[in-house]
Each structure stands twice: as structure tokens, then as C-alpha cells.
Image (tube, grey):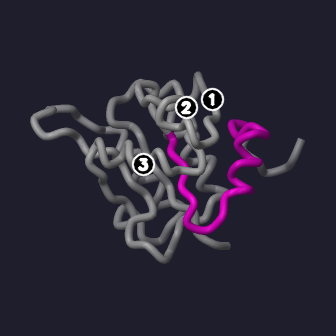
Amino acid sequence: MLKNIPAILSPELLKTLCEMGHSDRIVIADGNFPSESIGKNAKVIRCDGHGVPELLDAILKLFPLDTYVEKPVNLMQVMPGDNAKTPIWDEYKAIVKKYDPRGEDAIGEIERFSFYDEAKTAYAIIATGETAIYANIMLQKGVV
């Protein structure tokens, strides 16, 4: 056991976060995200039974966001014509604000299919049991 490490972070996830370097990206995916097919060339870490907000909060306690890009945090944009509501994004904004002085200005949106393309180049994908729609979030690592 280690002190001050959030219990939700498994040894595999901690190792992955540590291995990542500056500009590497990690996706925290909702339960509908095609994690295994999109993540064929990435590490896929299963966190079934957990939601994205609690993982995001635990990860950002340890994970520096990239200060050399305008938007080191990106969400999957709602498709035009899809009247989906995304209240979970407000939770994300509050969590990011706790750990990055840019707050919600550090958060961007990427069109759905472009998000999939970007996710294919991510270092890792965390597959969660999150049931909220459009709950996928991509983080770009900075330096300490």
C-alpha cells in the first residue's frame, strides 16, 4: 500500500500514468466507447464499475496537464442534431478547475469522429462503466 494515492487508481493505471511522457494522451472512456477496437495500439485499462468523474478527479491529483497547448483536456463534441444533454461536463469543469488554474478554459471539444481518430493515437484508454452519454474525455500530459 502507498500513502496519499487514491484507492480507485489500480497498480496498472498508476504504472501507465507514470510511464507516460510529455504530450502523451490518455482517454477516460464511457461505457459506450469502443475502447478495445479504438485502443488496438494502446494500453486498454479496464475500470468497470467506476464512473468517469471519480477517475478524472483521482488522476488529476497526480497527472500534470500540458501547459504548452491551449486545450489539454478535450471532450467528444455532441453530434449536430443530437439533442443530448451533457450535465456530466459541468462535473468535469469543476474537477479540472481544482487542479489547473485555467479552469474550464483548458477544456476543448473535438468532433466525434475526429475524437475517435485522436483516441487511436492515445497512449492508453481507460474503459469505465460510465453510463452518461458523451462522457468521454481526453487528457494530454504536461511536465512537473
Residues at marks 1 and 2, CA–CA distance in whole angstroms: 5 Å
Which amino acid type is marked by label 3? Tyr
Q: Secondary structure at mark 1?
A: strand
- Residue at horizontal 38 percent and vertical 47 percent from the top: 117
Q: Which mark is residue 127?
A: 2
**Quick one: label 3, few (<14), some, or many (20+) residues within 10 Å?**
many
Of the numbered discs 1 and 2, the one sitting upstream in the chain is: 1
Which amino acid type is marked by label 2? Ala
Q: Secondary structure at mark 3?
A: helix
Q: Nearer the viewer, residue 17 or 62?
A: 17
Q: Position of residue 90 (x, y in %)?
A: 35, 47
- Residue at horizontal 56 percent and vertical 40 percent from the top: 125
Which quarter of the rendering shows the N terminus?
A: top right
- In magenta stretch: residue 26: yes
Is label 1 or label 3 in front? 1
Residue at the far left in the pictured view: 81
Range drawn in magenta = 7-28
Q: Which mark is residue 36?
A: none
- Return the residue at label 3: 92
Q: Position of residue 133 (x, y in %)?
A: 33, 30
Asked whether, in this view, residue 100 is left or right of residue 111, the answer is right
The answer to which image quadrant residue 43 occupies is top right
Q: Which mark is residue 46?
A: 1
- In magenta stretch: residue 90: no
Residue 104's place in the image compared with 136, above or below, is: below
- Residue at horizontal 61 percent and vertical 68 percent from the top: 22
Q: Do tag 3 and tag 2 residues touch (Cβ < 8 Å)?
A: no
Of the numbered discs 1 and 3, the one sitting upstream in the chain is: 1
